[in-house]
Image (cartoon, grey):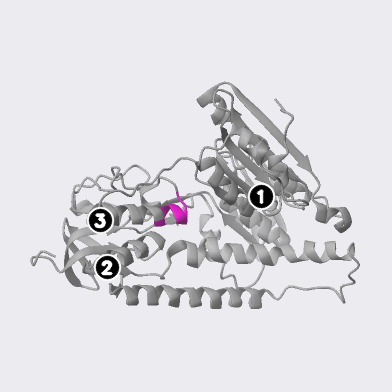
Amino acid sequence: MSTEFDYDLFVIGAGSGGVRSARMAASKGKHVAIAEDRYLGGTCVNVGCVPKKLFVYASQFPEMVHASKGFGWSPLGEATLDWPKLRDRKTDEIHRLNGIYQRLIDNSGAVLYDGRATVLGPNQVSVNGQIHTAETILVATGGWPFIPDFPGSEHVVSSNEMFFLDQLPKTAIVVGGGYIAVEFAGILNGLGVQTHLVYRGTRLLKSFDAEMSNKVTQGMIQKGVNIHLDTEVANIQKSAEGLEINFSDHTAMSADLVLYATGRVAATKNLGLENTKIVLRSDGSIPVDNNFCTQEPSIYALGDVIDRVQLTPVAIQEAMVLVDHLYGDKHAFIDYDNIPTAVFCQPELATVGLSEEDALKTYGDISVYTSDFKPMLQTLGGGDDRISMKLIVAKVSDKVVGCHMVGDHAAEIIQGIGIAIKAGATKADFDATIGIHPSAAEEFVTMREQTR
């Protein structure tokens, strides 16, 4: 380290990307500091992936109990949800994970500052009134829920608050059409809340394969979620009974809670980046080059704050690549193509590769294979769930360029198939693979008849 700086690397933000960067840099003998003013582990651990998945599990038990009757079980009494217990046990688990992150940082040798860091210049950071200098600054501050300003917007909550509600509402309106909206609509519905999902667009999950997102919509309706498309909130008024939501078409609806899940924006406000050469995009995100360097040569950024692919595993891989670029042999890289992802809605959606729409644009000549069937559990369980699968093949190469699934265990199955697609597997490779019977996953290697 140059003697003119306090640290080789100063990381702002102790989320997945920031902590991995700090730990890896410290393991290479660098003098590293990391600052966090909110919670260790970032969005994913505290108000994102982890608590959300715990709530998804909780919301699925009523269906499991119902299915058990078809297998000979006779549940005793009527099950009821203890919301405070679920909420508080979730919080206990998050605190446990916070402690793990604390130990990871401490054991790495990095210095942790509890406070908000602001950038004073290309090599200067201030935390709690103390100025630190660093040869390199890394901004990994993540994102924050975006709620538009409209009459009554002060009465709504974001996904952040959903994990800490004093009580579960009897009726709720979720506004939005992306993955956070559909996930929370499924959670609330499964927990027994009368749930309405309101979206101003014509199709939920519009960035996903259209056929599969429509399957999700159909499945949500079957499970009891009331979906209102082409519908926009005009204003919200509070009364003694709850909230009155007025829509732009002059209809109205009452609810105990309104959740706005209308996107996330980069957390760059009041960060001090105006003291550098960095020019933010209109949405507040930070532009970077292929090595995650900003317009200020000594300042780097990664994760949700650069708004490339907002996924925790992506931020972690970006961190590995960055540390290799700064302090390694510069061989590491990240490929943003064929990243598997899942939406933990109900029914669950998982995907890797191109949608049918994008594959048509990219390759023109494609083959599409689909399968739709009732899962084995439901044959005795008596539910209405179905599983839908889809393979998209580029005819010129026979490569499978897209794989999509809606239904139970979609994320677990697509993670494995993601390896095959990343490796360039062809439809012939899929056809030559022996299936595991009986399983839903075997359908991916037995689809022989081209749908279109």
- Residue 238 belongs to magenta span: no
Give the Cα distance between marks 3 and 2. 12 Å
Residue pushed farthest left? 4
Q: Which residue carries the number 3 mark?
A: 328
> What is the quadrant of residue 290 in the picture?
top left
* Residue at 69% across, 32% down: 369
- Left or right: 122 as drawn, with respect to 449: left
Residue under pointer 2:
26
Task: Indicate which label's residue lies in the foreground, 3 or 2.
Answer: 3
Specify the segment rendered in magenta: 310-316
Task: Give whichever of discs 2 and 1 has the lower sequence position.
Answer: 2
Q: Is residue 344 visible?
A: no
Q: Quadrant of the N terminus?
A: bottom left
Question: Counting other residues with Cα less than 10 Å from the Cα at mark 1, is it few (<14), some (14-19), or many (20 or more)?
Answer: many
- Viewer-side label of 1, 3: 3
Q: Secondary structure at mark 2?
A: helix
The amino acid marked with disc number 1 is Leu
Helix, strand or loop: magenta stretch: helix
| Cα–Cα gap, marks 1 and 3 | 48 Å
The answer to whether residue 196 of the structure is visible from this angle is: yes
Residue 259: x, y in percent? 58, 57
